[in-house]
Amino acid sequence: MIDFEAPKPIAQQSFALTTVAENMMRPVSRYFDEQEHEIPWDYINFMHMAMRATGAGSLAPRKRKPKEGEEKKKYPPIGYQSLAFLLETLSWGDVGLYLCTPGGGVGAAAIEATGTPEQKQKFLARFATDKPTFGAMAMTESQAGSDTSAIRTTAILDEETDEWVLNGEKIFVTGGHKSLVDSDGLVVIWATIDPEAGRAGMRSFVIEAGTPGCQVTKLEHKMGIRASDTVSLVMQDCRVPFENILGSPEVVRRPRSKTGFKGAMQTFDATRPLVAATGIGVARASLDLVKEMLAQQGVSIRYGLPRQKLTNIEREVIDMEVMLRSAWLLVIKAVWMADNKLPNTREASMSKVRAGDVVNRITQKALELMGPIGYNRDHLLEKWFRDAKITDIYEGTGQINRLIVARNILGFHGRDLR
Amino acid sequence: MYSFEPSDEQKMLIDAVRRYAQSDLRSKAHEAEEECQLPASLIEKGWELGILQASFPEECGGFGEHSAVTGVLAVEEMAWGDMAGALAVMSPGLFALPIMLAGNNEQKERYLPDICQSEWQPYTAALIEPHFDFDPNELRTTATAKDGGYLLSGTKTYVPYAGNNECMIVYATLDGSTQGFILPKDTPGVVISERQKLLGINALPLYQVDLQDVFLPAGNHLNGRDGQGFASILDAMRVAMAAIAVGLSRAALEYAIDYAKDREVFGVKVAQKQAIAFMIAEMATEVEAIRLLTWEAAWMLDNGKEDASVSAYLALTGATDMAMMVTDRAVQVLGGHGYIREHPVELWMRNGRGIAMLNGLAMV
Ligand SMILES: Cc1cc2nc3c(=O)[nH]c(=O)nc-3n(C[C@H](O)[C@H](O)[C@H](O)COP(=O)(O)OP(=O)(O)OC[C@H]3O[C@@H](n4cnc5c(N)ncnc54)[C@H](O)[C@@H]3O)c2cc1C
């Protein structure tokens, strides 16, 4: 039965999240935008405490094993749906700060999607301790962005010690500094065990904070999301135990198995709609503020009029609402599919394509509509304009996600459409 | 709790409508448009699917309950087959649904069982007026109380089946709001013009209707909710037209996909060119997004949500742009061949431009 009612637990958390966004984020938005590499510890500590208390924010749906004799809970899984709402609302507060939220982030997502039960146990436990801890994921290299098969970081097995030896340089690692320097976190690193093999050689490895041979070498200065750290990592003969290769040993040892690459793609199916959700939060913030500023000027939006009778401002605002709502519904559908274990590659990329488009259009229009006021740093509109742009870039650019949607629809393989 | 799965009953209905849309509506669409005529047997077959009848409870002669969601699902499939055909089959709904939403008991008893239990009959409604800033909430057609009844005056356009109509609803401004009136055929003062020629949907017979001091007894006024039922009528029109846009756009998208996978250029399939593949990806994303927006609006109407009217309005706004964008690109994907009337995409593009102007020609 088609239903657009948010599940009760989600509706219940919404008020609390908005309160956090309004009180913990908005008041310091401007400050952390301007103090680029300062770490927002107040926000981090508060969120860590709050999330431990409420259990919110874990990426994977909570898999609670029913106790002996206890009936299995009937409530359908809503882990990704809750997370989409959480991210959207916190990003409505401030997406840069949201990206500093403690927890495993995309690193944990990769472990969740591809790790063995033992690996999940071993690596994810740290995020539930009493210290805020961070996780990151490092795929991109200077010569390998969209084309992930071009990565050159190598992982060679040292048979004697049964350790992987990693060498290479990663760039643009979100939260890399917090994961390796500011907390006892971890980074999931993509490397090749066979540089000749392209995708078939790709595997992912966990590097824990404090591992010798892995260093944060650069903190980027960015257009937006400045509260979030984006770093380069250099690995020089960085050794990790054999078990730190994600996936089951039989599979990871098979030389030409594509599971490594497929694992990355699976992770994206889960994370792309979530990234879309963050962008939508930013766009909603802009649209809300525009409507509020218009209302202060006595301009109300006359919904229901034919377009020929609307003023230009009304048309723009109405179009922004259509864009925002329809993009959000694509996100909801994609995460609903993820929760229900339905294959969602197409929907995940569609939600990212749409969000990438509309959040930029909306935040850009918001400035135009507010004229000189919008362009001024007195308001956050110009910040949101900068923050929104990343939505169409990371976790697969708009073009890459178009390729994925198109291949999926057309029944093409990568070689048919590149 | 979110769900994007239609119920089992809805799925059966969708399947049945899809089969009809494919083997009947779609296969006849080209000829119907060229000859400006839909075979009566085609309409009757669509009518027998019982989409409208399933919207009415038993006491009104139907066998179900009113649901905008179900209506939207069915109409989308119909319009996937052919927009003109879909509007034709659903035309009695333009009369019956307003009676249910805004009529009094007497009117319901008098009309609904007969409509539901008979063959398809040319019942219709007259809403749209011929001026550029036409606004369904500010009609220029007026109704004035007189001699225990009403006098109606004004000009209506795009009235389906007015030429041989059984009975129609005419919307007019009364006391500052839009209200409906039942106009039986052959009422004095009504002038029905020659059949209109439009950019698209030419298979559907449409007429201009002039009303000059047309007297209607008080019993013909849709006063079931003190005459204030038009808001929900308009909501139901908007989601229906949005669903038609979705069905039409999906048709264009699918046609473009099939063509692009088949056509070769420069030694590869044209779909292998990014310029085309990206258009297709964007078309598909647009259709999926607006489809969800339409479903949500219909769901809000069914569940009496506060912002349901705004949602229906936003859905139609989005659907208007989607239909133009997607059908235009479908023609582009086919190149010169898309411009030739043997392929359906140019008709869909002509029909797609009509979504905003034709609101009022469908209801769920
Ligand atoms: C703030 C920030 C945070 C990031 N966080 C992370 C992170 O945590 N982990 C991580 O691994 N990476 C991260 N990234 C990297 C990000 O995912 C890449 O920048 C992105 O995938 C694009 O790669 P690129 O920059 O090398 O661009 P390129 O791949 O060089 O692309 C350049 C342009 O070409 C287009 N293009 C590329 N290939 C094609 C094609 N086949 N068809 C059509 N067009 C194409 C692209 O869309 C783009 O417009 C981050 C980046 C930024 C800016």
Image: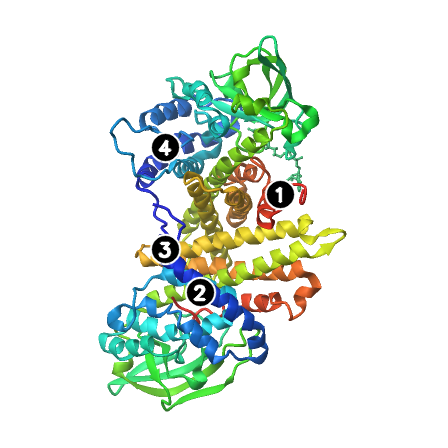
Q: Residue at x 50, y 77 (%)?
A: B204
Q: Which mark is residue A20?
A: 4
Q: First in sequence: mark 1 or mark 4?
A: 4
Distance from Cα at disc 3 to Cα at disc 4: 42 Å
Q: Mark on residue A399?
A: 1
Does label 1 point to a residue whose CB lies under 8 Å from ligand 1? yes
Discs 2 and 3 carry the same chain letter? yes
Residue position marked by numbered label 3 in the rendering: B8
Three-letter residue code for mark 2: Val
Compare residues B125 and B251 and report the one nearer the observer. B251
Q: Amino acid at mark 3?
A: Asp
Residue B69: image location, x then y, percent: 37, 59
Quarter of the picture for ligand 1?
top right
Q: Residue furthest right?
A: B266
Q: Chain of mark 3?
A: B
Most extreme residue toward the bottom is B188
On the same chain: label 3 and label 4?
no
- Three-letter amino acid code at the position of disc 1: Gln
Q: Nearer the viewer, mark 4 or mark 2?
A: 2
Alpha carbons under labels 4 and 2: distance apart: 49 Å
Identify residue type, mark 4: Val
Q: Residue at x 43, y 25 (%)?
A: A103
In this rendering, the answer to whether A407 lies above or below B20 is: above
In the rendered image, which residue does mark 2 sit on? B17
C-alpha distance separating marks 1 and 2: 36 Å
For the residue labelled by badge 2, is the local secondary structure a helix, a strand or a loop?
A: helix
Circle 4 chain: A
| Quarter of the image where the C terminus of chain B is located | bottom left
